[in-house]
Image (cartoon, grey):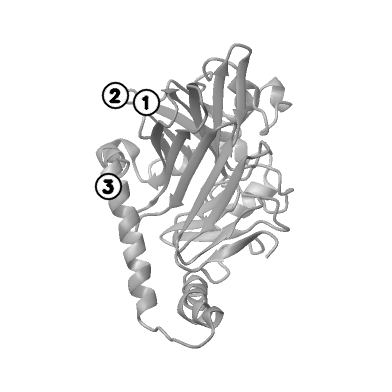
């Protein structure tokens, strides 16, 4: 137990040291839409067959410190420029005042604090939905007001997982991104391989207005990609360049101003990543899914599903650890194995 402890009351394992010997993953959603999230916020998501309809670019063979699939940056405005970090530890590797990753039933919750700015992020797929939600709460725990921006980021993969690795010249030529600005200031970033543009379109958006965006990895990292994921050069400019990448290595990045947070004040941001046939036809549905009351309802529904699932068999022995294994962890593992088998893991292609 060098990396954390079991919280039996909440039926979770709590990781307290992000530098685990290997990435600790947790499954969210189902094969209809889902995948796994690791304890530093990286995610491998798919819709249906993970070998033939993969969404995020997650290469488990890369070092644990490397960005994989999804992340979130925060930046603080100051007189000398911007201080940039990730509340997920990777890829910034910023030392934390506090870090907890709650490996829950169908969700990951990551809590961290840097220089008095606390982040609390719940990552899950609502039951029956084909989208991942990241429910972000940022609280100013410091003694003075702070000006903050949030920049959620996703890196896409070619839908054919094997081709992503074997066709380095052709795959980038098929990838396309475009933006759909909304009247309320929000931006929906869309992405697809050109041969699937009318069938499988990925989208990435937020509940709060975005001041700017970027979809080209080379531009986002800067300096001809000699800028790094740990400190992207574009995050030191006031705005992102707003490139719509018609080919190349496609990402989605949205710069969301959180504004001025007074001491003790909290700002909430919902980040949504999903896939549909035609985004323009589902904008109302996408927006509704990010309404705070609907997010809360989906979170409660997920908890109720697991309470019902685990309640089918409960045992009581003199050993509390035995009870936890029989009542929570073993049935949860059986459910995960039945749902995912070797379709998606750190070790199997899918």
The C terminus sits in image quarter: bottom right
**Quarter assignment of residue 1:** bottom right
Q: Is residue 333 visible?
A: yes
Residue matched to label 3: 294
Q: Earlier in the sequence, mark 1 or mark 3?
A: 1
Residue 296 vs residue 48, the one in the foreground: 296
Residue 270 vs residue 12, the one in the foreground: 12
Q: Image height check: is 5 above or below 333?
A: above
Residue matched to label 2: 184
Q: What count of labels does the image hold?
A: 3
Residue 250 place in picture, x, y as percent: 56, 34
Determine the secondary structure under disc 1.
loop
Q: How many angstroms separate mark 2 from mark 3 (CA)? A: 19 Å
Residue at 56 percent across and 47 percent down: it is: 41
Q: Earlier in the sequence, mark 2 or mark 3?
A: 2
Q: Which mark is residue 74?
A: none
Residue at 52 percent across and 78 percent down: it is: 330
Q: Is residue 106 left or right of residue 183?
A: right
């Amino acid at each position: 137990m060098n990396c954390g402890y079991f919280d039996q009351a909440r039926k979770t394992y709590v990781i307290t040291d992000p530098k685990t010997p290997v990435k600790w993953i947790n499954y969210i959603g189902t094969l209809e839409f889902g995948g796994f999230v690791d304890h530093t916020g990286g995610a491998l998501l798919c819709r249906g067959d993970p070998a033939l309809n993969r969404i995020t670019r997650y290469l488990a063979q890369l070092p644990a410190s490397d960005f994989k699939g999804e992340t979130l940056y925060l930046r603080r405005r100051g007189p000398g420029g911007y201080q940039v970090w990730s509340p997920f530890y990777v890829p910034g590797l910023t030392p934390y005042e506090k870090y907890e990753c709650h490996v829950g039933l169908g969700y990951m919750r990551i809590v961290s604090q840097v220089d008095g700015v606390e982040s609390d992020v719940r990552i899950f797929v609502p039951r029956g939905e084909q989208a991942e939600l990241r429910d972000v709460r940022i609280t100013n725990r410091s003694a003075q007001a702070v000006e903050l921006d949030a920049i959620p980021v996703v890196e896409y993969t070619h839908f054919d997982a094997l081709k992503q690795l074997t066709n380095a010249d052709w795959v980038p030529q098929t990838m396309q991104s475009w933006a759909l600005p909304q009247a309320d200031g929000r931006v929906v970033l869309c992405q697809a391989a050109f041969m699937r543009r009318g069938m499988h379109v990925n989208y990435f958006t937020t509940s709060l207005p975005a001041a700017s965006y970027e979809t080209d990895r080379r531009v986002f990292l800067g300096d001809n990609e000699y800028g790094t994921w740990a400190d992207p050069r574009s995050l030191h400019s006031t705005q992102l360049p707003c490139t719509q990448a018609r080919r190349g290595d496609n990402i989605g990045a949205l710069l969301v101003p959180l504004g001025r947070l007074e001491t003790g004040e909290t700002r909430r941001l919902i980040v949504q990543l999903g896939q549909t046939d035609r985004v323009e036809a589902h904008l109302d549905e996408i927006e509704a899914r990010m309404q705070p009351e609907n997010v809360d309802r989906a979170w409660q529904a997920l908890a109720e599903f697991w309470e019902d699932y685990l309640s089918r068999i409960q045992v009581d022995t003199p050993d509390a650890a035995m009870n936890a294994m029989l009542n929570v962890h073993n049935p949860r593992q059986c459910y995960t194995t039945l749902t995912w088998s070797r379709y998606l893991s750190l070790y199997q292609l899918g």
